[in-house]
């Protein structure tokens, strides 16, 4: 583990579900003092034994040198803390709305001169069904607000007349009724799904920027339900036509908002253009941990420099980084009984005592053993790096073979998309 080249700092991590455990733990191993608060009650055991846990983050604000918020929804608190003179990594009310209010996010893209896909927002399933019947096409169902956190509800239609989307909307109406909230129907377009992201220091974007390919479906070859994430592949670049056509146009707006943190925009691209889908105006998961695998400087030092609004170039590895989640039941579903029966307190066993490239997520540590906790069944992320994608994949899957977790499963094709997608992106002039 690298050690910091500057005096130890005090980091307070304010987390929604404990997703930044890996970053907090790494920061503590570098010699910094770390405290972590988790808002979600059922997730509060996460991190026990790894880092010092606190029950009320507000009580530790004065103690902290840097405060890090790991999710959207804390924008007002971040703004207030910055106004009081604290160093904060986190959102603003504006960037919260970019992610949480899909309609607002799309309108801001148009306002900044970014091409968008046709979409329409609905409050009623019947209105949406009627709209598809009158405008037959292939669509994507995108829940808005808090419902969008249930990733398996996002549905990508394949029927050219939208008949499959109509069937899903009818099923949602039966199971959710009026509790579903607002949602969007967005016109589906064929192409390569890709995201561009960067850290922002309150004034400008920091380079290099990150290009990520997410693998959201449950099974290999993009089969099954959407999970949010099963793994990602990525690389760092100093220039990107996709970044320039999207996020770069928001630089002055983010500076005006005094945003300090990480922001990502997910897109579909093809030979006709670049079409932004949605913002993630915070750390992405597992994106930030895979990014860490490709960053050569200590994570605590990196976070400190970003929070204190320094201008610098991030020291990154050449080549590629990949990461895959190893998950357990009931993932990707929410089933407390199944989790307690099959997964709770199960031990993460290492055949050889080598933990490099293994990132703790929903874990606690008891007597130096890593035990599964939380309630969703996402114990670890495993990463690999290499000059080529195949080298990075080989390192990651070799590391996975060193881990034994009862009833665990993972995708065996993380990174495979690159070999076809890269040819398309080169031909379209987007790499």
Image (spheres, rainbow, N blue to C red):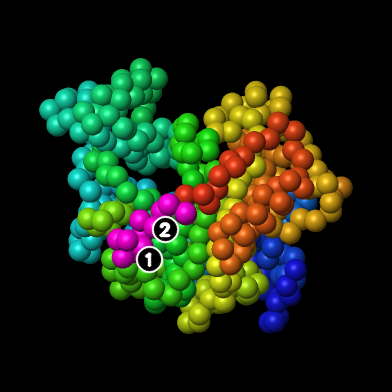
Q: Nearer the viewer, residue 323 or 333?
A: 323
Q: Quick one: which residue is furthest to the right in this view?
A: 367
**CB atoms of marks 1 and 2 within 8 Å:** yes
Quadrant in the rendering for residue 411 = top right
| x and y percentages locating residue 269 in the rendered image | 31, 54
Residue lying furthest top? 174
Residue range corresponding to the magenta coloring: 418-431
Q: Residue at x 29, y 54 (%)?
A: 270
Which element type, helix, strand or loop, lies under badge 1? loop
- Quarter of the view holding residue 329: top right
Residue 52 percent across, percent down from the top left: 73, 56
Look at the picture and state if 259 lies above or below 4.
Answer: above
SS at mark 2 in the image: helix
Q: Residues within 10 Å of mark 2 (few under 14, many from 20)?
A: some
Disc 1: which residue: 431
Label 1 neighbourhood size at 10 Å, few (<14), some (14-19), many (20+)?
some
Q: Give the camera-side residue of 39 and 255.
A: 255
Residue at image location 81% in from the left, 47% down from the top: 350
Q: Is residue 344 magenta?
A: no
Residue 103 versus residue 268: which sits nearer the camera?
268
Name the quarter where the C terminus is drawn: bottom left
- Residue 31 x, y percent position in the rendering: 75, 71
Give 71 or 382, whichever is nearer the viewer: 382
């Amino acid at each position: 583990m690298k050690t910091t080249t500057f005096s130890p700092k005090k980091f307070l991590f304010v987390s929604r579900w404990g997703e930044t455990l890996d970053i907090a733990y790494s920061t503590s191993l570098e010699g910094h003092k770390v405290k972590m608060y988790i808002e979600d009650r059922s997730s509060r055991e996460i991190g026990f034994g790894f880092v010092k846990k606190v029950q009320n983050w507000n009580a530790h604000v004065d103690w902290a040198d840097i405060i890090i918020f790991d999710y959207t929804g804390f924008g007002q608190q971040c703004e207030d803390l910055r106004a009081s003179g604290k160093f904060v990594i986190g959102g603003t009310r504006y960037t919260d709305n970019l992610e949480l209010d899909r309609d607002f996010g799309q309108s801001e893209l148009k306002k900044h001169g970014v091409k968008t896909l046709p979409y329409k927002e609905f409050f009623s399933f019947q209105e949406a069904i009627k709209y598809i019947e009158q405008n037959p096409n292939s669509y994507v169902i995108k829940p808005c607000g808090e419902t969008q956190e249930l990733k398996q509800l996002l549905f990508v239609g394949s029927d050219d007349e939208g008949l499959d989307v109509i069937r899903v909307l009818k099923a949602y109406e039966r199971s959710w009724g009026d509790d579903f909230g607002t949602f969007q129907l967005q016109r589906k377009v064929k192409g390569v799904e890709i995201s561009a992201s960067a850290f922002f220091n309150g004034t400008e974007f920091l380079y290099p920027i990150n290009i990520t390919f997410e693998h959201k479906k449950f099974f290999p070859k993009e089969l099954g339900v959407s999970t949010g994430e099963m793994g990602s592949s990525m690389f760092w670049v100093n220039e990107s036509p996709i970044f320039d056509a999207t996020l770069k146009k928001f630089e002055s707006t983010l500076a005006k908002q005094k945003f300090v943190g990480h922001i990502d925009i997910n897109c579909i691209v093809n030979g006709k253009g670049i079409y932004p889908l949605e913002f993630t105006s915070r750390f992405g998961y597992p994106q930030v941990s895979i990014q860490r695998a490709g960053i050569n400087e200590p994570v605590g030092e990196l976070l400190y420099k970003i929070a204190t609004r320094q201008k610098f170039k991030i020291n990154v590895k050449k080549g590629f980084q990949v990461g895959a989640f190893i998950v357990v039941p009931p993932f990707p579903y929410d089933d407390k009984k199944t989790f307690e029966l099959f997964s709770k307190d199960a031990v993460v066993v290492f055949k050889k005592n080598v933990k490099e490239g293994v990132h703790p997520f929903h874990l606690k540590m008891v007597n130096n053993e890593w035990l599964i906790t939380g309630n969703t069944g996402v114990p670890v992320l495993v990463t690999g790096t290499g000059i080529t994608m195949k080298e990075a994949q080989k390192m990651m899957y070799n590391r996975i073979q060193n881990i034994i977790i009862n009833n665990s499963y993972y995708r065996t094709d993380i990174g495979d998309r690159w070999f076809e997608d890269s040819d398309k992106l080169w031909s379209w002039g987007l790499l």
